[in-house]
Amino acid sequence: MNRLTLAEVEDTARAAHAGQTDKAGRPYAEHLRAVAEGVRARGGDDEQIAAAWLHDSVEDDALSARWLEEAALSRRTKDIVLAVTKRAGEPPEAYAGRILTTPGALLVKESDLAHNADPARLAVLDEDTRRRLTEKYARMRTLLGLSGEESD
């Protein structure tokens, strides 16, 4: 089976999230691009970059778990996407544990957290939301063993 190219994965992710915006009201595809670029900049491989493009697709119901399972992607890419997909009612510790035990997933989540915690992105949010998200991202970084502040 021929695997989807990175360009095809990007096109699929952009189409799946078309019309969606992030908490700051920006097109959601900007977040996906930033996470994929962050993975690339951190030395990630094509399977991790593909997972970065798709990292929120199942969680946000932009693509189904069945689509992911049947997609022409490597098992590793699928496993990374599933690892970083939050499950309803799941404790943060269990979520972090799954990421840590899935080869390649930590780099994708690190890039996701770095973009989510970008001060420029957070600056446009109200103070309560900004504080809540900053604490949430810092806690996840701690659970994942990611030390210090991110510098992108």
Image (cartoon, helix red, strand yellow):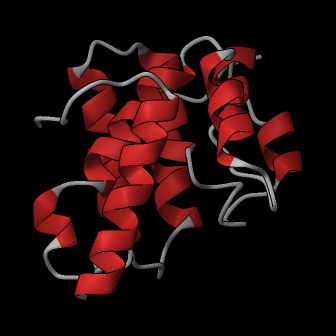
Q: Please determine whether, in this image, residue 67 is positioned above or below residue 16.
A: above
**The C terminus - image quarter:** top left
Is residue 30 visible to us here?
yes
Please provide percent x and percent y for residue 151. Answer: 11, 35
Task: Give the side of residue 67 with respect to residue 81, left or right.
Answer: right
Q: Please determine whether, in this image, residue 106 is positioned above or below residue 14.
A: above
Please provide percent x and percent y for residue 15. Answer: 53, 64
Is residue 6 visible to us here?
no
* Residue 88 sits in quarter: bottom right
**The N terminus - image quarter:** top right
Q: Nearer the viewer, residue 25 or 3?
A: 25
Looking at the image, which residue is at 19% across and 55% down? 118
Q: Please determine whether, in this image, residue 59 is positioned above or below residue 132.
A: above
Please provide percent x and percent y for residue 148. Answer: 21, 29
Looking at the image, which residue is at 21% across and 69% down? 122
Q: Nearer the viewer, residue 151 or 39?
A: 151
Q: Nearer the viewer, residue 49 or 135?
A: 135
Task: Give the side of residue 132 with respect to residue 43, left or right.
Answer: right
Task: Give the side of residue 123 with respect to residue 125, left or right.
Answer: left
- Outermost bottom residue: 126
Task: Give the side of residue 1 with respect to residue 92, left or right.
Answer: right
Looking at the image, which residue is at 49% across and 74% down? 18
